Structure formats: C-alpha cells, structure tokens
Image (cartoon, rainbow, N blue to C red):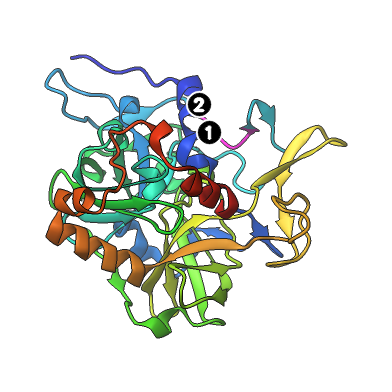
Amino acid sequence: MKHKLFKIAALSLVISTNAMAMNKVIYGQDNRVSIEESDKGFLVDSVAAMVPSYIFARSESGEVLDSIFKSFPTLKSHRGYPTCSDMKFRSEPTISSCTGFLIGENLLMTAGHCMIKGGTQVADTVSDSCKKNKWVFNYKATSVNSDGKLVIEKNEVYGCKRVVAASYTGLLDYAVVELDRRAADKKPLKLNLKSTAVKEGTDIYVAGHPTGLPLKVSGDAKIVTNKPYRNDVTTDLDTFAGNSGSPVLNSKDEVVGILVAGEIDYVFDYDKMCYRVNKCEGQGKKCDRMSYPSKGAMGETVTKIAAANHDYVLKKVLGPLFINQNGLISEEEDEEEIVEEVEEILNAGF
C-alpha cells in the first residue's frame, strides 16, 4: 500500500497563492465562532473545504483512505513569520484554500477564482483546480483528536468530476462543480433567488474556512451596498482568504450570495514582530491597513446568488457553444490573450 507524504511546506505554499490571495478582513469585533459553538451545526453537512488532493493517503488503485495527520500547518505562522500569541484559533489546522456549499445531491457552488483562471469563463470543463483538489465536509475544530492528530474520514472526501459552469471575469465570480459521487447523506442549501434577498440592510452571516481553518460561522453583519446593475454586493462580514466560495445566508438560512473578495487580512505588528488580524472600523472607514487608503475599507464582496444562478443555467443549456459563439476566452488559452480592459477591471475590483 502506497501513501502520499503530507508536506507542510508545499501545502503552505499552495494555500498562500491563487484562491487564498483573495483577501478579506475583520470589521469591528471578530464575530467568528467555531461551528461547534454556534447554533448552525447543520452546516457541517452542507459546507465543504477545498483541500489539495496530494495530502490524502491513497491505496495503490488511487482510492482515498481514512487520513490521520500527525503534523499539519496551523495559524501559528503566516507568510513565514509568527502570528501574535493572542491570535484567535491560532493552534488550529489551516489545510484548505477555498470553501464551497452543496446546491444539489452532487453539485457544489464556490467562487469562480477557486476553480478557473482570471479573465475566463467555462462550461463543462475539467480545470487544473478540479483535478488537483478534493472537497471535504465535516472539517471542524474537533477533527483534531485528543492525541493532537488531524483525522479526515474518507466518506467525507469528494472529488471534482468537472466544472459544470464558471465565470471569473471581474463582472461575475462563481463556479458550479459536479462532485465525483452523490452526497446522499448531506444537505443542499436553499437558494433565495429573489431580487429583494439582497436589499441593503439585510441581516446576513457567512459559513466557511477562513485562512483554511476548520468550519467557522460569522454573523452580526449586513448588506451595506447593493447596486441593481451589478452582480455583487458589499458587506461588513468578518472573512478571510479561504472564505472564498463561502455561502452568505440570511436569517432564514437561505443563501443570498457567495463570498468572493475583500480587504487585506493581516498586518505585521513591528512592536511585537508578529502578524495580527487587520481590523476596519466599517465599510468605507479606516483600517489598520487598506487596499485603497483614499477610499477607506472596500467591504467584503459577495456575488449575488441570483446572478450566479442565471449564468449557470445559461451555460448549462448552451454548454461550450455559449463560450464559442460569444468569442469569450476559454481556460485553455494563454493569459496573455486576455484583453487589458479585463485586467484593469480585476485590478480595480480586487
């Protein structure tokens, strides 16, 4: 029986790039709590973490086995430097790079940038990210047992069969993934596709894997701005890179959006010589560190679930023909061919 080695350094590199580069931040108090401490425990069977495939032990036939890790990266360090000793969840694992959530027995929705390259949109495609990652349910703080070992059971691990539809264009950021088997014992989340679901002032919360941590829930947040002509809204959710693809839900536990981007996550404290959480006073207000100081905190960006669903249905019906007829850039084309206008939109938006 052959086992793949769990390489902390390589994993840390993977989760520090691409999807994990989509920053988020804390607004006011840090409202994140572990799923075990919340009243949203049902979400462990609805929300999944995207984890690199190579960390799992496998049989000679390639089947994922029950994996027990004696060592794993934690939040005790960030970008090669220590985090401050009072960092929340500091000793917990950080093994994932994105979040997703079930919308059907074998369908999962996430952020487009978790699955495809910038400036592209696809239909019925097996992307590199699809090939290289697994989706893990029930990844929570108690996954680390009393012996300090991280245990992930094989029945909680799903592969990506294909990307049914995805867009990551600067105007829209989402992906729908078909899993390699039915998640019969899991619970798809209900989507609220009404335009009124994203009204300014709507109470919301988010569930996901900030900085690759076990499942967290963060509430006490609202939709801050919603412009009808845009496919996204801004919020004051407490989120981090790794939350990309997380479901944003209302008080009825209905999904109203997908978390995709936000402010800078961490700042370096030169007095203590460690990284700490970046805090903002509110959307448009002052942060410890800001992407655009003259504009204030940009807020956390959420793709409207109705916009994602509309695009998904269109691509599902027309498939690759949709990509070709509209002259859009496929994932296989070189990034050099992406027009400068799209790059400017991405840089301005994220």
Task: Give the amino acid type for the residue marked by disc 2 in the picture.
Answer: Leu
Q: Which mark is residue 302?
A: none
Q: Which mark is residue 16?
A: 1
Q: Nearer the viewer, residue 83 or 22?
A: 22
Residue 12 vertical placement versus 125 (above, below): above
Q: Nearer the viewer, residue 88 or 99?
A: 99
CB under 8 Å between callouts 2 and 1?
yes
Q: Residue at x 30, y 43 (%)?
A: 135
- Asked if residue 73 lies in the magenta stretch, the reply is yes
Looking at the rendered structure, the secondary structure element under dot 2 is helix
Mark 2 and mark 1: Cα distance apart in space: 5 Å
Looking at the rendered structure, the secondary structure element under dot 1 is loop
Residue ranking furthest to the top: 2
Q: Examine the image and state in which quarter residue 270 appears.
A: top right
Q: Examine the image and state in which quarter residue 197 appears.
A: bottom left
Report the quarter where the N terminus lies.
Answer: top left
Q: Which class describes the residues within 10 Å of circle 2: few (<14), some (14-19), or many (20+)?
A: few
Task: Give the amino acid type for the residue marked by disc 1 in the picture.
Answer: Ser
* Residue identifier under label 2: 13
Residue 332 at x, y percent in the picture? 28, 33
Residue 37 at x, y percent in the picture? 50, 62
- Asked if residue 149 lies in the magenta stretch, the reply is no
Q: Which class describes the residues within 10 Å of circle 1: few (<14), some (14-19), or many (20+)?
A: some
Residue 239 at x, y percent in the picture? 56, 56
Q: Which residues are magenta?
A: 72-77
**How would you classify the magenta stretch by its main secondary structure?**
loop
